[in-house]
Amino acid sequence: MNFVSVGGLTSRSSSTMSIATIHVSTCHITGTWSTIDLVVRGTLTLSLNETQIHAQAGDIIFIRDGVVHGGRPETSDTIYGCIVFDMKKMLAGSHSFQDQIDDILKHITLISKHIPSNTPDIPKIMQYLFRSMAEEYPGYELVVTGLLYSFLGLVRRHGLYHQADPLALREYKRKRITQLKQTFNLIDSNYPQPLTLADLAKAANLSPNYFCRFFQKITHHSPIDYLNRYRVEMACLKLAHTNDSITNIALACGFNDVSYFIKLFHRYKETSPLKYRQLIKSHSK
């Protein structure tokens, strides 16, 4: 499975399964879907709620549903892939071990976020899982489902899990994260429009000063920096999938100054929008 490493977004999904492969580098909410990241090459920094993880080639990151998360490649040659899936649908059914599955689905048992490359068994399982999703050979749906069960079984075998915090503490953390979801939803739906710090803070129902500190702690970016990164990521999509001019793409993504857009694009992607488009086109041939 080959993903472009310069911040574009590609995807492959199945019409018959609640699972898809994607590559993203913006911070976002997973909703009802869980995510498995596999670092193919280079190093990657991931933010998961209030935790920051540094992953290297071969490492696996498991992100349960509802977690605010985002990835940032640390080197220009970094390649990583993501598989997102609806665990409740993928693992539905009546089993003699359903109580173990239910504890995971209800977040009573929490799978370790970071699974290093030297962990027994699991990296090979994950590589096979990603390869199966990429190839979509006859019967791959059954293989993928079986591999997810194998993953959970190996997590149990190697003790790569822990019990959740007490209910009151979990509820407190959930409430804090829920406040940020409103800001992310605002950015998702209104990034082409002018947005101020006050707008972002108001969406979270927080004062601007507290909002800035809280947002920085969760995402490791300031609100405005995150907004600019998000807009650049949306520009990457348009560069990859449309023939629109650089100027029109900049305007469509919320930048009213094309020079400033190009400056930010180069800061985040270490290349120009034009060269990025050329690189994406060459990878897609």
Image: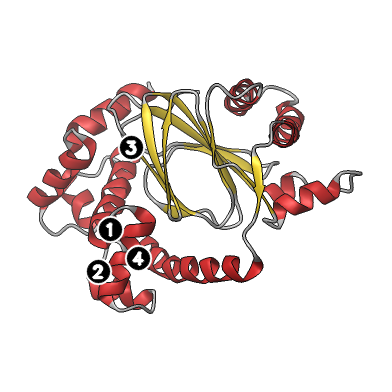
- Give amino acid for label 2: Leu
- Label 1 belongs to which residue? 227
Closest to the camera, between mark 2 and mark 4, is 4
Q: Mark 3 falls on what kind of element?
A: loop
Pointer 2 local density, CA inside 10 Å: few below 14, some 14–19, many at least 20: some
- Label 4 belongs to which residue? 214
Q: Mark 4 falls on what kind of element?
A: helix
Instruction: Please state the horizontal and vertical placement of residue 188, each as a whole percent of the image.
Output: 39, 61
Pointer 4 local density, CA inside 10 Å: few below 14, some 14–19, many at least 20: some
- Label 2 belongs to which residue? 195
Query: Which comes sooner in the sequence, label 1 or label 4?
Result: 4
- Reply above or below: 179 against 260: below
Q: CA distance from mark 4 to mark 3?
A: 25 Å
Query: Which comes sooner in the sequence, label 2 or label 1?
Result: 2
Res. 264 in view: yes
- Reply above or below: 190 against 20: below
Query: Which comes sooner in the sequence, label 2 or label 3?
Result: 3
Instruction: Please state the horizontal and vertical placement of residue 219, each as a whole percent of the image.
Output: 36, 54
Identity of the residue drawn at 31% across and 23% down: 77
Res. 92 in view: no
- Give amino acid for label 1: Leu
Q: Mark 2 falls on what kind of element?
A: loop
Pointer 1 local density, CA inside 10 Å: few below 14, some 14–19, many at least 20: many
Identity of the residue drawn at 35% across and 23% down: 283
Q: State left or right for residue 222 relative to residue 26.
A: left
- Give amino acid for label 3: Gly
Closest to the camera, between mark 4 and mark 3, is 4
Query: Which comes sooner in the sequence, label 4 or label 3?
Result: 3
- Label 3 belongs to which residue? 7
- Give amino acid for label 4: Phe
Pick the front one: 56 or 243:
56
Query: Which comes sooner in the sequence, label 2 or label 4?
Result: 2
